[in-house]
Amino acid sequence: MASLDQLYQEIILDHYKFPRNKVDLSHVSDDQLYENPSCGDTVKLEVIFDDGGRISSVGFDGHGCAISTASASLMSERLIGKTEDEARSLMEKFIKVMRAELDPEELEAWGDLAALGGVAQFPLRVKCATLPWNALKAVLDSKAE
Ligand code: ZN
């Protein structure tokens, strides 16, 4: 029987090899390119809301390691259909788990995203996992302006 760790590793590798919602965002300004210098990860994010105020599409672009790419891919899937407030609350919770301020079990109701819970134990990887979420925060903050 595969352990939970193995299952989580497989989910992360699958999202790294076959990222969901990875698109060409060359039309998005490089001012909106977010970087994690400690690993070399880069990400751009485009979040589109429908008329009802729910996220109808999320695209990301960039180059990153397995953890940052999987995090962006898993995040993009999770955000579809969410309101801005719901997206912010997911982001805040995810970042708290990564900072070990919340138990990783908090992510268990989030489906495949729970696979990233274990990253909190590896401080160098935390920046990889949170990069797309920090980009999300910047995108939502700029929308509010
Ligand atoms: Zn990385």
Image (tube, rainbow, N blue to C red):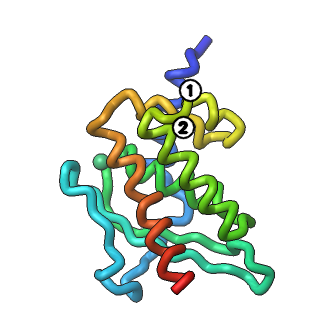
Label 2: state its secondary structure. Answer: helix
Above or below, 84 against 100 in this view is: below
The residue at the far top in this view is 1
**Residue, x 53% and y 73% (percent of image)?**
140
Q: Amino acid at mark 2?
A: Ile
Residue 69 spot, x, y in % from top left:
41, 53
- Mark 1 highlights which residue? 7
Q: Nearer the viewer, residue 47 or 22?
A: 47
Q: Is mark 1 within 8 Å of ligand 1?
A: no
**Residue, x 26% and y 56% (percent of image)?**
36
Q: Nearer the viewer, residue 89 or 19?
A: 89
Mark 1: few/some/many CA within 10 Å (<14, 14-19, 20+) = few
Residue 104 spot, x, y in % from top left:
55, 31
> What is the distance, in whole Å, between disc 2 and disc 1 at their CAs?
6 Å
Dot label at residue 85:
none
Q: Is residue 19 left or right of residue 50?
A: left
Residue 77 spot, x, y in % from top left:
63, 57
Mark 2: few/some/many CA within 10 Å (<14, 14-19, 20+) = some
**Residue, x 38% and y 56% (percent of image)?**
131
Above or below, 136 against 14 in this view is: below
Proximity of marks 2 and 1: CB atoms separated by less than 8 Å: yes
Q: Quadrant of residue 3?
A: top right
Q: Amino acid at mark 1?
A: Leu
The residue at the far right in this view is 52
Name the quadrant of the N terminus. top right
Q: Is residue 96 left or right of residue 50?
A: left
Residue 110 spot, x, y in % from top left:
67, 42
- Mark 2 highlights which residue? 11
**Residue, x 48% and y 75% (percent of image)?**
139
Q: Nearer the viewer, residue 71 or 135?
A: 135
